[in-house]
Every structure is written in structure tokens, then in C-alpha cells.
Image: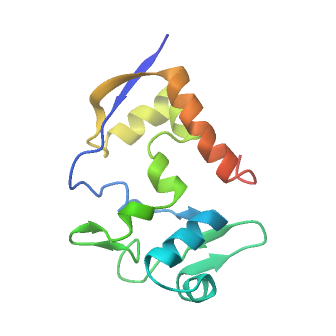
């Protein structure tokens, strides 16, 4: 059975600095709004871009994420499913090539406890459940 290693490295924000979008569940939106002491509608108007089937954080002009600062993620305690699950995303754990590609820039891959591939795939199912229109 194939095994993986991953342990997020303290202070690292490399995943947050990558190009791409951060998708939100309705629960993510509500949790972050509450954490920021905002109403969900106010948070959505200010920070969220809505498509027909998906919610995603708007990308500011000057950096990749509104919530990424010099000290790291300012909403770390309530970060979205997508952020919590990284790098255990279906498209990464189901492809040896994608895992190796991600390891080129993620210093936590290859460190930490061994995780069986089936356990990683089970964790990746959280992404599938959170974003069914994407998977």
C-alpha cells in the first residue's frame, strides 16, 4: 500500500501564495463572518465572488488572499475546508505526479508521520463533499 508524509511547517504560507481560487462552503462563509464579527451578507459583499454554483474568496490586487499577512493567516482558526484539507485534495492524493509536483513548493510534503494512501483519500473525501460541483 502506498504511503505519504505531510506535516504543515510552522510559519509556512507557501500554499496561500499559490495562484488560484479559494472556494467556500456556506458554512465557511458563516464561520468566517462570525469570526470577523460581521454579518454573513456583509462578509459576502466585501470578500466573496459568487458564481451560479460556487462561492469563492475575491482575490485582492496586491496579494493572493485578503487574509494572508506577514504573520500568516488571520482567519487560521476558521479557515475554509479547502485550506484545512491542503494538500489532501483528491486531485493531489490520487496522482503520484501531482503529489510530487506539489512537493516542489510545499516544504511539509515528505515530513511528519506516515499516512496510508487510503487514509489520505478518505480525508480528501471532505473536499468532494464540500464542493460537489467541482468533483
Q: Determine whether, in the image, residue 20 is placed left or right of residue 102.
A: right
How many numbered marks are there?
0
Residue 70 in view (yes/no) = yes
Q: Can residue 94 be seen in this view?
A: no
Answer above or below: position of 31 versus 84.
below
Q: How is the image coloured?
A: rainbow
For the point 53% across and 54% down, the residue is: 81
Q: Quadrant of residue 128?
A: top right
Q: In the image, residue 109 lies at what x, y percent?
A: 32, 35
Image quadrant where residue 43 sits: bottom right
* Drawn side of residue 10 relative to residue 116, left or right: left
Residue at (21% x, 50% y) in the render:
10
- Answer above or below: position of 42 versus 5: below
User: To which quarter of the image does residue 24 belong?
Assistant: bottom right
Q: Which residue is drawn at 40% across and 41% down?
A: 102
Residue sitting at the far top: 1
The one of 29 and 17 positioned closer to us in this rendering: 29
Please provide percent x and percent y for residue 116: 46, 19
The spot of residue 105 in percent (x, y) is: 31, 46
Q: Which residue is drawn at 72% across and 73% down?
A: 51
75 left or right of 45 in image = left
Return the residue nearer the eye: 128 or 20.
Answer: 128
- Residue 79 picture location, percent across and down: 45, 62
Amino acid at each position: 500500500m502506498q504511503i505519504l508524509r505531510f506535516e504543515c511547517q510552522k510559519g509556512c504560507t507557501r500554499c496561500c501564495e499559490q495562484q488560484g481560487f479559494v472556494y467556500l462552503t456556506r458554512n465557511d462563509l458563516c464561520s468566517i463572518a462570525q469570526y470577523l464579527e460581521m454579518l454573513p451578507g456583509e462578509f459576502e459583499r466585501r470578500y466573496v465572488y459568487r458564481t451560479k454554483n460556487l462561492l469563492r474568496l475575491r482575490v485582492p490586487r496586491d496579494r493572493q488572499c485578503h487574509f494572508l499577512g506577514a504573520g500568516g493567516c488571520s482567519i487560521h482558526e476558521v479557515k475554509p475546508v479547502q485550506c484545512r484539507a491542503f494538500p489532501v485534495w483528491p486531485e493531489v492524493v490520487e496522482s503520484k505526479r501531482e503529489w510530487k509536483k506539489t512537493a516542489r513548493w510545499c516544504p511539509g510534503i515528505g515530513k511528519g508521520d506516515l499516512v496510508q494512501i487510503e487514509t489520505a483519500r478518505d480525508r480528501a473525501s471532505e473536499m468532494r463533499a464540500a464542493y460537489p460541483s467541482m468533483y
